[in-house]
Amino acid sequence: AAAKPADDTNNASNGEETSNNDDGPIIVKKTIAPAKPIPFINSNGTVLGYQLAVDRRTLRRNKSLQPLHEWLKVQSDCGHITRQETVSMIPPVVLNVKEGMSVLDMCAAPGSKTCQLLEVAGGLENSSDSEPTGFVVANDADPKRAYMLVHQLRRMNSPAVFVTSCDGQYFPILDAKADKGTEKEGMFDRVLCDVPCSGDGTVRKNPGIWKQWNQLGSLALHPLQLSIALRGARLTHVGGYVVYSTCSMNPMENESVVAELLRITDGSLVLEDPRGRMEGLIARPGWSTWKVLRESKARTRRAMKDRRKKNNPKMMEKKKEWEEKRLKDGEEAPPAKEAKVDENQKDEEEKKEDELAPSPYDTKPYVPPATWDDAALSERTTSLGFVEYASYDDVEPDWARRVRASCFPPTEEEAKKFELEKCMRCLPQDMDTGGFFVALLKKVKPLSKGATERMNLLAKESRGGVEVNAFLNKPGDEGKEKKSANGKESDDVTMTESSAAEDKTDTEPAKASEDEESKPEEEEKKEEEELIQKAPTGKVGIRHKMQNKTDTSKNDFIPCDPSIWPPIVEEYGLSSTFPKDQFMVRASGEAKILYFISKSVKKDLIDHGIQDRVTVINSGLKGFERSSLKDTTISYRLAQEGIQYVIPHMTKRVLTADMDDFFACVTEGYLQFDTFSESFQKRLEQLTSGSFIVILEGYEKDASKKMYLSMWKRTNCVNCFVAKIEMEAILSNMRALGFVAKKVEEKPITGLEEVEKPAISGVIESL
């Protein structure tokens, strides 16, 4: 489901009625249009996306819409629907994921697009499959946001997701050495690069973004976005697809990145147009030409902040008081300091004063241009404090590191070759949404050596021009903090060094190649050992400090101790087909939880050593949890979260129930045996104390519906070990099946000892 952006002036409604009471406020009544289907969000012809004709703020605050809001919250928490903006749904649809595919979401948080990808890739490729053969790797550079991502993905209840945290431009490449540079290159069938951006496309729902927006921010993001996109292309299988997307309308973050990506890869990537398979989508063509601008020094965010601080009323009042006090005391004004100023500096100061002059176009309210020709617009932007460049040759040396050659439009010959018009620009007014940019690229051949070198260079530059290993602990360096050559941890300081390295690499490719060939085998071996390091996360200079305090390897998944299994197999009658090797524990200590990991995740990721290269946040589903209750001999109980992957192998402690008995089980608290029918009660009494499963009749082999309950039997009662939100989901499914609940009289239960309460599956496990 998609809610439209906040826009009180353009609310989609069928009618409006105003009543004016002299003794009270004006009441405006609106008839809200019903949710409309989004044709391009579909599966096999069935529409799966709907857009509400009301914004999120109104939905939360309007009391008449409260029932709808509560229903949406429950269904969202249950995992039945995902709420997001309409344009946010476009990139996963453009990526065209299929069941059984391997997918990477490089910048996944907060996770709405990841849920879309997982819903398809984590589905069953064949009806005979018992588990998903595809998977989604959800990565985010910020560990805190990655943990929020886990909470979002819990709703999907899928083992086919692997959540990691590392800088996207450093995501590890796990190809075999023999596959590099060949048709077997790459790890994923689909890669989504929904990169960090300035977010100016969201201004309709977030007008406050203009207070922080500036062009320099977009120029600073440009190399990072390019670095992530290049890494995504390298990680994609030949024949696979990459989607590059932003919620910005700025060509510095959109077409210029795509053009440079096509320029660097030199035929390895080609743009494709997905409009033909997306019914109802309105997307304007990408641009092949644009203007390159930057703010003048006097219009930068810091300069404007200093100017506001200097000229604020309090400061002006203090200056006035000081001047009055000086005159009253008869003190002479301090002599002005004489300084030698050359002609160039005078010119700069005069230019700065000119730039500070108020612009006739800076009006409130805003007045649109009288004409849209280039000359008039150039005059307007210059007056507003921007500097416009016709080509990269016009860029001043001081700004050459920020306003890069890749920011400029392609030549006419390149424009014909790149076909940037195949990019999609989704504007707010076209579909009553926010703004979004999407580009679909197909990888037709492996990346060249030059493209790979440029990828590595851009990645290093994004970390301040410092090698990633400089921010990681090496043997014998414990407790030492590594910094850049000048002792600072600033991106801006070391950017020049990296750029100089880039220039040197571009001008001397042959020499670099010769040096690589002449390296001794020992040095190459040493480099390979250094590369087996975890990729950095977060801001520059922070990662290595965190590593001194915490050992991230404790979050890794490792095989279970074999001694755990004999009593579990005996208690639940697990058959010989039970996949013990797919149940793993965290390396943090005691095996409190046994996680079910899908075969594809284990084989293609864990067994390939991905845990040695990234910080692992979460994966799999809880299959068994350690029990502390004393009334049973078994030490592990069945966990509701991954129960559907255990039940097919169980031959003991499984009961089937009709609709009434099953509904009676879906209740919080303790349930006496006489709550159920006589036949079900007898079967309960025959069970020994401990964990058991209740299945709704007719759904014994339908794991997709998951009409299963994890229960616990005591001497004279049972209770359901299912989180409240999942109970809501099960009851919703029962209502969909036509079940109508009967009123049941609650009976008090006394004489019970303290009973272990089930863990809430929606809460992220503390690591």
Image (cartoon, rainbow, N blue to C red):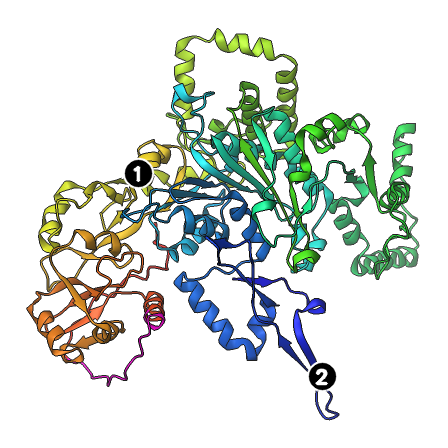
Residue 766 shows in this picture: yes
Q: In this view, does 512 lie to the left or right of 339?
A: left
Q: What segment carries the magenta color?
A: 734-750
Residue 490 shows in this picture: no
Q: Which mark is residue 18?
A: 2
Instruction: Determine the residue positioned at 72% across, 93% down.
Output: 23
Q: Residue 602 carries which label?
A: 1
Q: Is residue 244 left or right of residue 312?
A: left
Q: Earlier in the sequence, mark 1 or mark 2?
A: 2
Q: Which mark is residue 413?
A: none
Q: Is residue 749 magenta?
A: yes
Q: Is mark 2 on a helix, strand or loop?
A: strand
Foreground: 291 or 627? 291
**How many labels sit on residues?**
2
Inter-mark Cα distance, 1 to 2:
62 Å
Instruction: Determine the residue positioned at 52% across, 76% down.
Output: 66
Q: Which amino acid does label 2 sit on?
A: Thr
Foreground: 138 or 218? 138
Q: Is residue 4 magenta?
A: no
Residue located farthest toward the bottom when viewing the structure as drawn: 23
Q: Where is residue 77 in the image (x, y as percent from the top left)?
A: 42, 63
